[in-house]
Image (cartoon, rainbow, N blue to C red):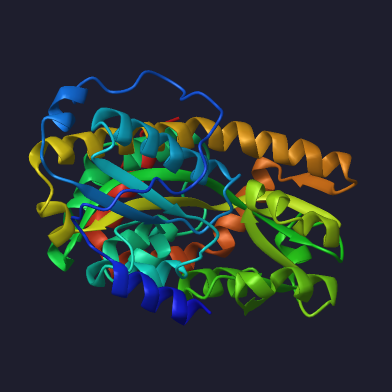
């Protein structure tokens, strides 16, 4: 089914086309903050260029990332008088992040909010953002990705044929399980925890004494329900929206990784846009990323409250316990940080340390 979808989209893809269509759902919630003023409706409507942009989104259409993409869509289409239309495919209809990231250059999609762990397979410095226990709060996150460090990462994508348009917050990843509360590293020992397939994540949970078990997210609910794995790790909204809490008793707010997505397009596709459209697209991305930043915190707080009401037992690690977890994985962080780029690793740590 997915191969047929990929083939159909590839066959019918026109990167800069006269096709119409608006695709996706129109969000009912108003944008948070004012729209950027650097692009005007006149700049878009005076252009003779017609563009259709296919956006692949991995989450369901009610997730705040999908809502953010719809905010971008509304802004772009309004500013261009509908000459630049945006079609949104949610729920990984086109493919998973890695499939679509590689397919951007072939036209299977034109834009992807892609996990930075996936991008790290192609532009290695992005892997620094997947290191464990880097951040204690969102201020540190903002200092890293919204400043010169984050801009330098986006610039590196041009070397491999992409344009990075901005970072969207997806939230801290936390751990659930069905066996017992996790209050310390000792409590992690022997637990079968479903993780992502990236080596860093696997080694982190090995260092904590767990038995990391990579598997497709689509298989996770049934695997938890049947006891194939004891637990998993994900941002709070992902856990709640996918009803994983219904088959998990215990949630530990360990915040072992902060998850980002990077809004990416192919450089060839971007370079074919007229400058006025490039500016409107860039401003639309600012609306989307700002919405994700503000919504991530509020949506996670709501998800946590709902899971508590559903009977999930929540453990918030003490500062001493958090330090124990951080120390247990220190070797993994140093190994990968120095393998990826020791200078940028140190630069990132210095930025984080400068923010209280």
Q: Is residue 69 left or right of residue 41?
A: right
Residue 83 in percent (x, y) is at 23, 40
Q: In the picture shown, does residue 338 fall above or below 155?
A: below
Residue 112 in percent (x, y) is at 36, 57
The answer to whether any part of residue 209 appears in the image is no
- Name the image quarter holding the C terminus: top left
Q: In the picture shown, does residue 25 fall above or below 293?
A: below
Q: In which image quadrant can residue 77 be found?
A: top left
The answer to whether any part of residue 179 appears in the image is yes
Q: In which image quadrant can residue 243 be found?
A: bottom right
Q: In the picture shown, does residue 211 fall above or below 327?
A: below
Residue 111 in percent (x, y) is at 32, 55
118 and 351: which is toward the camera: 118
Residue drawn at (77%, 52%) of the image: 251
243 and 228: which is toward the camera: 243
Identity of the residue furthest to the right in this view: 311
Q: Is residue 192 left or right of residue 55?
A: right
Residue 160 in percent (x, y) is at 17, 67
Residue drawn at (47%, 73%) of the image: 198
131 and 94: which is toward the camera: 94
Count of marks, rendered view = 0
């Amino acid at each position: 089914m997915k191969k047929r979808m990929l083939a159909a989209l590839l066959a019918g893809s026109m990167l800069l086309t006269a096709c119409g269509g608006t695709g996706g759902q129109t969000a009912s919630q108003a944008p948070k903050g004012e729209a950027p003023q650097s692009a005007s409706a006149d700049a878009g409507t005076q252009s003779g260029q017609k563009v259709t942009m296919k956006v692949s989104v991995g989450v369901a259409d009610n997730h705040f990332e999908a809502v953010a993409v719809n905010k971008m869509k509304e802004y772009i289409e309004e500013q261009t008088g509908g000459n630049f239309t945006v079609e949104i495919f949610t729920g990984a209809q086109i493919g998973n992040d890695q499939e679509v990231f590689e397919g951007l250059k072939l036209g299977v999609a034109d834009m992807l909010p892609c996990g930075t762990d996936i991008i790290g397979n192609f532009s290695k410095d992005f892997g620094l953002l997947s290191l464990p226990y880097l951040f204690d709060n969102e201020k540190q996150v903002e200092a890293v990705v919204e400043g010169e460090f984050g801009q330098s990462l986006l610039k590196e994508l041009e070397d491999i044929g992409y344009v990075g348009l901005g970072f969207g917050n997806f939230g801290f990843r936390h751990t659930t399980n069905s066996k017992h509360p996790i209050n310390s590293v000792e409590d992690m020992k022997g637990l079968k925890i479903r993780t992502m397939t990236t080596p860093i994540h696997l080694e982190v949970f090995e260092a904590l004494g767990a038995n990391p078990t990579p598997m497709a997210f689509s298989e996770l609910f049934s695997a938890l329900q049947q006891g194939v794995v004891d637990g998993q790790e994900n941002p709070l909204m992902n856990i709640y929206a996918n009803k994983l809490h219904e088959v998990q008793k215990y949630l530990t707010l360990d915040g072992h990784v902060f998850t980002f997505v990077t809004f990416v397009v192919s450089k060839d596709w971007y370079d074919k846009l007229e400058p006025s459209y490039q500016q409107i697209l860039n401003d639309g991305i600012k609306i989307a990323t700002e919405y994700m930043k503000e919504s991530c915190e509020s949506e996670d707080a709501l998800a946590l409250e709902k899971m508590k009401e559903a009977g999930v037992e929540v453990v918030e690690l003490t500062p001493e316990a958090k330090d124990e977890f951080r120390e247990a994985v220190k070797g993994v962080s140093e190994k990968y940080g120095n393998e990826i780029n020791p200078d940028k690793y140190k630069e990132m740590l210095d930025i984080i340390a400068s923010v209280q």
